[in-house]
Image: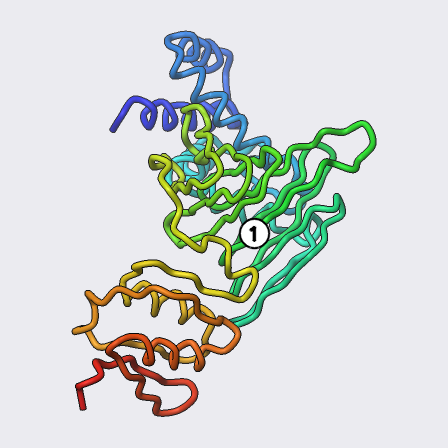
Amino acid sequence: MNKSSSSIEEAAFWYACLQAEDATEQDRRRWQGWLDACPSNRQAWARIQEVRSLFDKVPGRLASPVLAQKTSRRAVLRSAVVLVCAGLAGAGTWRQLSSPELHAGLRTGTGERSRQVLADGSLLYLNTGSAMDLAFGPSERGILLRAGEILVETRPDKLPGAARPFVVHTPHGRVRALGTRFVVRLHGDHSSVQVLQDAVEVRPLLSMAQPVRLSEGQEIVFDSHSAGAPHMQPAGAGDWREGRLSVVNMPLPDFIAELSRHRKGYLGFDSGLARLRVSGVFPLDDTDEALAMLADAFPVRVRSFTRYYATVLPASKP
């Protein structure tokens, strides 16, 4: 275990101790000694407080009992350490912030896309199979991405006298806009960001490192603990907003996976085509036409059993 992970766990332990109903003055002195021992401990404590502050936005009746009130030491120790260290700091915070009191839920089904104008004038595009909540408040213009992918075009804050940051939260961390147009996608065990204009800052949920700045044309992948190195985003990033799948030299398995997001039913491929590379611009609103274009341009054919079951095969295979 690295030092930052150890400090985070120790911070969670001390948070649990101080929250317990039987916390003593000796506990507080020992905590202060731990806090003063090294900078990484202070950074970890600040990170725990940041996670805790997210729960302050939740109505009391919905907040986690462990974070909302004092209880027995054993219960707090068991719950808080698991909460922060095992990932519920992200997933639990996520569920609580998605409460009906805080959001206007938006979602799209398979093959659907949506365009929304937000209260501040920002534009929000939802890709196929996406779900998100709005969490605009006095200190932040927040979006909680729960599934799928969104493209955001931010506008200056319209709230008089305010300069609220525009932040997209995923279960893995936060993406802060720096006057920008960008894409955020949730992949299950990680999230990704593509910057189409200007820049963003990315901060994994449990990282104590400085946020990673991402510039126009760059992409990054991050989980709750760390972020990868920024790299050049693929051609056609964000083109789904216009109903296009633009690819350059994309492996066929990846192409099929992307097209499948916009098509109901099963779409598969012969394993012998795994090394085939695909380039072109394909329509997302008519996936049958996209498959026909694929068959016209590459040595493949499409076998369809029903409108909900299709397989891409080598052109010569019976």
Q: Residue 263: image x %, image y %?
A: 45, 75
Query: Residue 82 appears in which quarter of the rendering?
Result: top left
Q: Is residue 135 left or right of residue 317?
A: right
Nearer to the camera, 135 or 296: 296
Residue drawn at x 61%, y 46% is 143
Q: Is residue 250 left or right of residue 211?
A: left
Q: Residue 230: image x %, image y %?
A: 37, 36
Q: Residue 15: image x %, image y %?
A: 48, 25
Q: Quadrant of the C terminus?
A: bottom left
Nearer to the camera, 31 or 205: 205
Q: Quadrant of the N terminus?
A: top left
Q: Is residue 289 above or below residue 46?
A: below
Nearer to the camera, 6 or 76: 6
Q: Is residue 8 above or below residue 94?
A: above
Count of all numbered marks drawn on residues in the image: 1
Q: Residues within 10 Å of mark 1 (few under 14, many from 20)?
A: many
Q: Label 1 amino acid?
A: Leu
Outermost residue on the front side: it is 297
Residue drawn at x 38%, y 50% is 234
Query: Residue 150 appears in which quarter of the rendering?
Result: bottom right
Q: Which residue is mark 1?
A: 151
Outermost residue on the right side: it is 160
Q: Is residue 240 above or below residue 283?
A: above
Nearer to the camera, 71 or 136: 136
Residue drawn at x 49%, y 38% is 216
Q: Is residue 154 left or right of residue 13?
A: right
Residue drawn at x 68%, y 57% is 116
Q: Residue 187: image x %, image y %?
A: 40, 54
Secondary element at image label 1? strand
